[in-house]
Image (cartoon, helix red, strand yellow):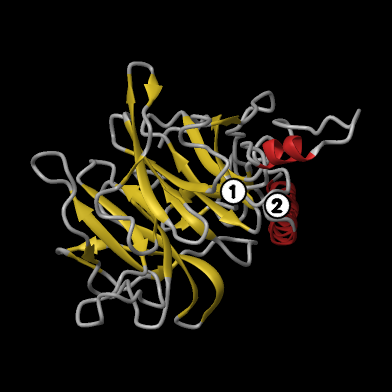
Amino acid sequence: MAIFNNLNFNNMRTSTVNCLIGIIIFACLYPRHTQGQNASGHPASLPRIIDSSASPTVFAPGVVSSPYTEWATSFDPDGHTVYFSRGAVYWTIVSAKYRDGHWDKPEVAAFSGKFNDTDPFVSPDGKRMFFISNRPLAGAPQDKGNPYFHIWYVDRLADGQWSEPRHLEGVVNITGLSNYAPSVSSKGTLYFCSRDREGHKGMQSYYARFIDNHYEQPKLLTIDSLPESQDPFIAPDEHYLIFLSGNDLYWCLRTGEGWSAPQNLGPQVNNGDANSSPYVSPDGKTLYYSSPRVVGFYKRDRSHALNYDQLIKENESLFNNQPNILTIPIRLPNS
């Protein structure tokens, strides 16, 4: 009986060891994806944040969106003042206020209108606005623009107006290099993009943490599978990121110190046109972006040929292939 038990135990032990070896080999050859994650620890698939039934609409047509070029939207925290860029030859920051159920006629921001200023971004607390500009630096001739775009900022004054522009000093702005599309989180981390910065080829996004009243050295924003990224919009709590790559807008979720694999926002947003400047409203429910999109908004009546006056009218319409600011509902996951 004892001999039988020992033989049985040895056979069982051998079978168990062989089984375990088989499991280990299988696991090595076919890595197991845990619930909601892939092998790298990133979410296996991100939820759709743009409903398939959703369609973009033009934001404030005839007031904010016009026959001219508009992009780079940002709001005060209460959502009643919008800042955006307008211009083709000269880029200018303008603002409009929402009163009595409609948007008022835009005004040029008090600090803009002389040099090329664009990409306004109001901090989540509304106390500071970042933007880029080619205005001259201190010590340079003040009647000639800087050949490069640097990040500047204005602070909110006690009377609600904005301060005089200040150059963002430190390690973010580099001599001989342009920065674009600043975006800032609630804790002050600055996101932006730059071309061929510090050995990184092409247009790439970066972030710089604000520690002890200064920005740390910017770090490359590494996003899997995409060769370039730009126009980063960071969530106030930094748990998601929306950005541009090529003509399309993507999003990803924070996973520890990194980011999940990006997901295209889909055909409701991306239809091949040159989209840019993503921004999510302060309440987190609406995506704003810039696009020259015509499909779905305008189609030429081909039952007859246009005469000259009709051609001019068409070219002076909102849908003349100049970027407008579009909006679409968005459903973002909680942090």
Is 292 in front, or is 269?
292
Q: Amino acid at mark 1?
A: Tyr
Q: Position of residue 77 (x, y in %)?
A: 28, 34
Residue 240 showing in the rendered view: no
Q: Residue at x 34, y 43 (%)?
A: 237
**Of label 2 and label 1, which has the lower sequence position?**
2
Relative to 165, residue 317 above or below:
above
Q: 201 and 136: which one is in front?
A: 136
| Front tag of 2 and 1 | 1
Is residue 289 visible in this depiction of the protein? yes
Where residue 30 appears, x then y in whole percent?
A: 74, 56
Q: Is residue 22 left or right of residue 166?
A: right
Quick one: 142 or 176, which is closer to the camera?
142
Q: What residue would you read off at disc 2?
A: 16
SS of the residue at dot 1?
strand
Q: Residue at x 15, y 39 (%)?
A: 160
Q: Secondary structure at mark 2?
A: helix
At which x and y percent is residue 262?
A: 60, 51
- Which residue position is annotated with label 1? 250
